[in-house]
Image (cartoon, helix red, strand yellow):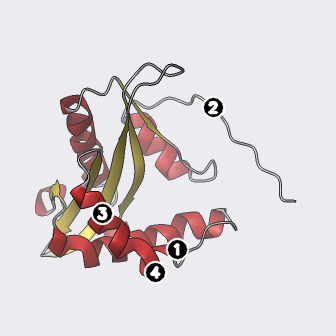
Amino acid sequence: MGDQEVTVRRARVEDIPGLVVSSSRLFAEDGGPRDPGVNVDWPREHGAAAFASALENPARLLLVAVHGGEVVGHLSGSLTEPSAMRPLRSATLMAMYVCPQHRGSGVGARLADAFFVWAREWGAEQAEVTAYSANSDAIRLYEREGFRPLSLTLRRAL
């Protein structure tokens, strides 16, 4: 499937059920297997309310990738205002997911590009994203989009 068959746009209220499904897939595929502390039921239990709230917040971005009327991917982002410690406005790519059948067709890059446009429009001076270290596919995508490693989180179960 070519990426021209997929439309990337700002999410709307009617996209919330599709966002919940897309987010559920992300949690099941990425967070759940890689992080035992992640509640894989979060999207189903809290996603609709969280997405509705994000749609109302100008410091948040929700994008959807739509094919044939179905949400086949999404991206969520947020802005962080400057502080005394970090005097730059920053845009955080919080989550991104593309259904497997649409991967490799440029949909992820189009979502990321739309995120960068939004971030620049809001005056962000830098963008950041986190990914699980075991998710080499996501890391490769983010590096192709210009992200570079900055820090490493280490964790120990207690």
- For the residues labelled 1 and 2, say whether their Cβ atoms are less than 8 Å apart: no
Residue at the image point whose x is 16% and y is 62% from the top: 6
Disc 3 to disc 2, C-alpha distance: 30 Å
Q: Nearer the viewer, mark 3 or mark 1?
A: 3
Indicate which disc, 1 or 2, sits on the residue closer to the N terminus.
Answer: 1
The location of residue 95, given as percent across then percent down, is: 42, 54
Q: Nearer the viewer, mark 3 or mark 2?
A: 3
Residue under pointer 4: 45
Tag 3 secondary structure: helix
- The residue type indicated by label 3 comes to Ser
Residue under pointer 3: 53
Residue under pointer 2: 151
Residue under pointer 1: 28
Indicate which disc, 3 or 1, sits on the residue closer to the N terminus.
Answer: 1
* Position above or below: 65 against 127: below
- The residue type indicated by label 2 comes to Ser
Tag 2 secondary structure: loop
- Report crowding for label 3: few under 14, some 14 to 19, many 20 or more residues within 10 A (C-alpha): few
Q: Is residue 113 left or right of residue 84?
A: left
- Give the number of marks: 4
Query: Which residue, as the protein is rendered here, is positioned at the far right?
Result: 158
Q: Nearer the viewer, mark 4 or mark 2?
A: 4
**Residue 39 visible to an observer of this rendering:** yes
Disc 4 to disc 3, C-alpha distance: 15 Å
**Residue 1 visible to an observer of this rendering:** no
Indicate which disc, 4 or 3, sits on the residue closer to the N terminus.
Answer: 4
Tag 1 secondary structure: helix
Indicate which disc, 4 or 1, sits on the residue closer to the N terminus.
Answer: 1
Disc 4 to disc 2, C-alpha distance: 31 Å
